[in-house]
Each structure stands twice: as C-alpha cells, then as structure tokens.
Amino acid sequence: MMLLIVAFVVALVAMLVVRFAYLFSDREAPSVFTYTFLGIGITGFILCGFSESNLIEENEARLKQWTANQCVAPQTIANSVLVARAGGGHGTAFMIDGNTVVTNRHVADSISPEAVFETEDERAYNGMMFHRADEATSPDLAFYYVMGGGDIPALKLAKAGPEVGEQVLVVGHNGNRGFYYASVLNVLGTGGEDSDFSPVSPLTSAAEFVLYTTLNFFAPSSLVDEGARTNDVIATHGDTAGGNSGSPVVNCAGEVVGVHFAGRGIYFFASEQLGFSVTLDDFKAEIEKLPPADSPPSVS
C-alpha cells in the first residue's frame, strides 16, 4: 500500500512542480506535461501493485524452501524480537543477552531514550538507551537496557557473516505487512551503500530523483540518519519495508549475521527491491564499545 501511495505522490508532485513553474509565465502549461506525469503516476500505481504481489508470492515460496532446508523456525526468532513504542513512534529491536536490546540509531532517535518494548504476546518492558553509536564513525545502531528481560530468549551471534547467494531470515515490523513478519532474503553482496548491487529501471530512477529532491527541500528531517556512510553494508533482496529497521538478520542456524537498517525507498518492480543491513563485523565491534554490564542505567 505504501508503494502505491508513493507512486501517486511522485506523479502529483511532479505535475505541481511543472504547474508552479508556469505560474511565472504568460503561457499555460502544455497539457502534454500534465498527461505525461499523470501517465507516469498511473503506470507506477499499476506496477507497484504487481510488485507488491510478486514480493509476497516470492517470499511465500522462499519460506517453504527455508522450512524444507530445516532452517530455524521464524517463530523461534520472533520470540526474541520486540517492538519499541514511545511517543507514537515504533520500531523493531531484538534481545542479545538477558537485559540488552539492540535496534537502529534512527529508531532510537524516533522513539526517545526511554521506551516500552513489547513482545509478540504483548508482554511489556521498560527500557533505557545506554549506548548510541557515533554518527560520524559507527553504523546505525543503538542499545537499550530493559528491566526484567531475562525471560526473553537472546539471539546468538554467528562466527562469520553471510556469503553472496546465501539466504537469510528477517523477522520484524514490516510496514507493508505487519508486526513480526518473516521474510527470507537473498544476499546480494557486501560493500559500500552506493555500490551497484541491484540495477533500477529508468522509471524508478526518475521517481527516486523527484521523491528525494522533494523531501530534501520540504522535509529534510524525514531523511533519517545521515550519519556514517563509511561502513560496509550487507545488501539483500526480499520482502522488507519501512518498520523493519532494527530487525535481526539471521542465518539458517538462527545466528545473527546482521542488523537491518534501510532499504530502497521506492521501486516499481519486485526485482528492484533492495535492503541494507549492518555487517556482523561492525555489529561485534560496536558491542565491544558497550559499558560494563554491572553498571546498567536507571530504568523506572
């Protein structure tokens, strides 16, 4: 649904820009511009609908294969996943030990230093952020201390990151599907976020340009976390969306190999979907910076 809305917004914004430009001219805006942009919007609307359907079907097939390969059950991972709520905001997080929850830095900035974390069965835990990764040098991570979280199973970290072509599992709040949604992703590679992991169509490229240029001008604060871009990322293809930020990325054995933090904001074809995760090495390096476990923050 979100992609359908974005497609129409892009078309309307583009049309309004043209109309606005012609306000300073004695001439009327040629109707060809209006119809062209409306045509792009309608085309995008139709393509987005097919894209969403294809992603769902593709994910259902991957989940069946995941199960057939005797990989970890999605529900097992969901038991360690939490949804963070505060001040109307929300995001995904997961437990890495008896009292430590990890999410993304931009999620933490959205939900505030104090947040309530809820499990799938609606148990609630008060949390306090005690480590926020440095925006200038570190990946998109933040850590919370939760009181009484010992009954939530912690996820183990893998010894090595995923290989290209390997399938991994993500469980979290997919904004297009719902809470605790399981997605099986294909690993495309590891490298800089601007690497050419997945080609895009001219239609998507044009839409991205209009969307991000407009957002940067009218609502720059909506382009979250402009922090470190020097860290490598894990690029994946699969059914993820806004809300998945902070979700654990696990291998077949159920071990964490990354932390999902972003994705391609707009695309018109399912094959163009692209997600980004913090690498295992960067995740482990940030854990090494955490303060001693015997000095937790005050949690009310």
Image (cartoon, rainbow, N blue to C red):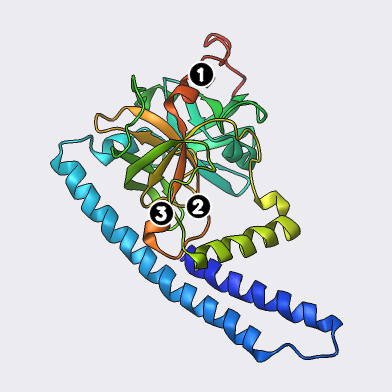
**Can residue 300 be seen in the rendering of this structure?**
no
Residue 251 lies, in percent from the top left, at 29, 32
Q: Locate the C terminus and report the quarter of the image it occupies.
A: top right
Report the residue marked by disc 3.
178
**Structural crowding at the residue carrying mark 2, measured as other residues with C-alpha within 10 Å and reported as few (<14), some (14–19) or many (≥20):** some
**Height in image: 275 above or below 279?**
below
- Mark found first going from the N terminus, 2 or 3: 3
Q: Is residue 151 left or right of residue 231?
A: left
**Height in image: 142 above or below 29?**
above
Query: Dot 2 lies on which element?
Result: loop
**Height in image: 61 above or below 141?**
below
Query: Dot 1 lies on which element?
Result: helix
**Structural crowding at the residue carrying mark 1, measured as other residues with C-alpha within 10 Å and reported as few (<14), some (14–19) or many (≥20):** few
Query: Dot 3 lies on which element?
Result: strand
For the residue marked with disc 2, what is the amino acid? Arg
Report the residue marked by disc 2.
264
